[in-house]
Amino acid sequence: MLRLATWNVEWFDHLFDDDGRLLDDAEWSGRRDVTREDQIAAVGVILREIDADAVMVIEAPAENHRRSTVRALETFAAHFDLRARRAVIGFPNHTQQEIAFLHDPDLMGARHDPRGRPTSKKGATGAPRFDGVFRIDMDEDGKDDLVTWSKPPLELAVETRSGVDLRLIGVHAKSKAPHGARGPADAMRISIENRRKQLAQCAWLRARVDQHLAAGQSLMVMGDFNDGPGLDAYEKLFGRSGVEIVAGGEDEVPMFDPNVHRALTRRFTAPPVTSRFTLPSGEVMSALLDYIMVSPDLREHLPRWQIWHPWDNPACVTTPMMRDALLTASDHFPLTLDIEV
């Protein structure tokens, strides 16, 4: 049995200095009204409690000429004596929010293994490498648009101790929030533009998924999609969400996450929730943003998904320390997958 997790740790980077050492003090973290020492302790409590064999860390510490994602994450793992103590990253970005894979090296090996061809600034169609440029006509005006990832997905080749080969793709898709809008009309324009880009990124990702499925590879796609079925009013304008694009349509080989199915088919029950955040208006919003999708062959290996929600997960409700840590650590909650491989 393997336990894999994905978790967006809000502004994880703010908890480390340039040498990757923990800033375990009473100064403010990147989270509102949360100190660095409190966020550090909360993240540590949660990672020890879920005890995953591997974690796809979204918003991992920055990678640049001064800072090292791997050094910071491995320092954190050593501080809390985590089994998942070896870190891997892919193409770094400029947002201070990397995608990284923290795993137990006694149970698996993992390496960055990007697919697709590099591109020039003019881009390419199909499924180019995720640090390149994708050409797609997003608004159907007969002209190709150029799409990039601000946070290129992390493509991993993973081999378990038992000799099972897995392909993993870690994702942090475009946010649709209208940051910097100057009034309602501008907010609508930015939201629609961001929605188009988010859907284009998901179409690019689905093209890569199709390549792996055609090759018969065992695949998982996991991370923060900033999207989900029925999440906003603009979905009707475009027909379906980005998550549905990656999961696959009627004529495509499906990628499965039961939470996607629940969100699409809900009638009398509340949808599952992986994120809780405060809007500029002060209103608190809950949403399903994080997913672990598996290929059809992995679905046959008795997978079990669990959202570590402070009020919806019985194990968290009855454990005050865990419940409080979940509310302190991030605006997202971890999602785990237990699978017999």
Image (cartoon, rainbow, N blue to C red):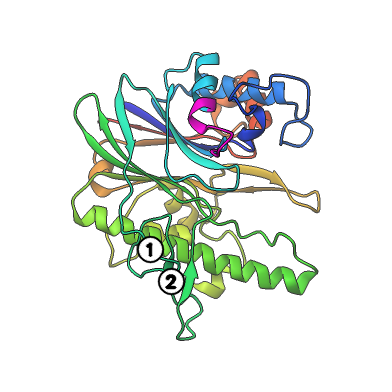
Residue 230: % across, % down? 55, 61
Who's the residue at 43% across and 49% down the image? Answer: 153
Q: Are marks 2 and 1 in contact (CB under 8 Å)?
A: yes
Answer whether residue 64 is magenta in the image: yes
Residue 136: % across, % down? 43, 73
Q: Quadrant of the N terminus?
A: top left
Type of residue at label 2? Lys
Who's the residue at 49% across and 57% down the image? Answer: 149
Front residue (pair 96, 32): 96
Who's the residue at 51% across and 54% down the image? Answer: 173
Name the residue that disc number 1 marks. 119
Label total for image: 2
- Counting other residues with Cα less than 10 Å from the Cα at mark 1, is it few (<14), some (14-19), or many (20 or more)? some
Answer whether residue 185 is magenta in the image: no
Name the residue that disc number 2 marks. 122
SS state under label 2: loop
Q: Magenta segment, which residues?
A: 63-72
Front residue (pair 117, 56): 117
Assign the magenta stretch its main secondary structure.
loop
Type of residue at label 1? Thr
Report the Cα–Cα distance between label 2 and label 1: 7 Å
Q: Where, by quadrant of the figure, is residue 324 drawn?
A: top right
Q: Check the image and report above or below for 92 versus 241.
A: above
Q: Is residue 166 left or right of residue 54?
A: left
Who's the residue at 72% across and 36% down the image? Answer: 31
- Counting other residues with Cα less than 10 Å from the Cα at mark 2, is it few (<14), some (14-19), or many (20 or more)? few
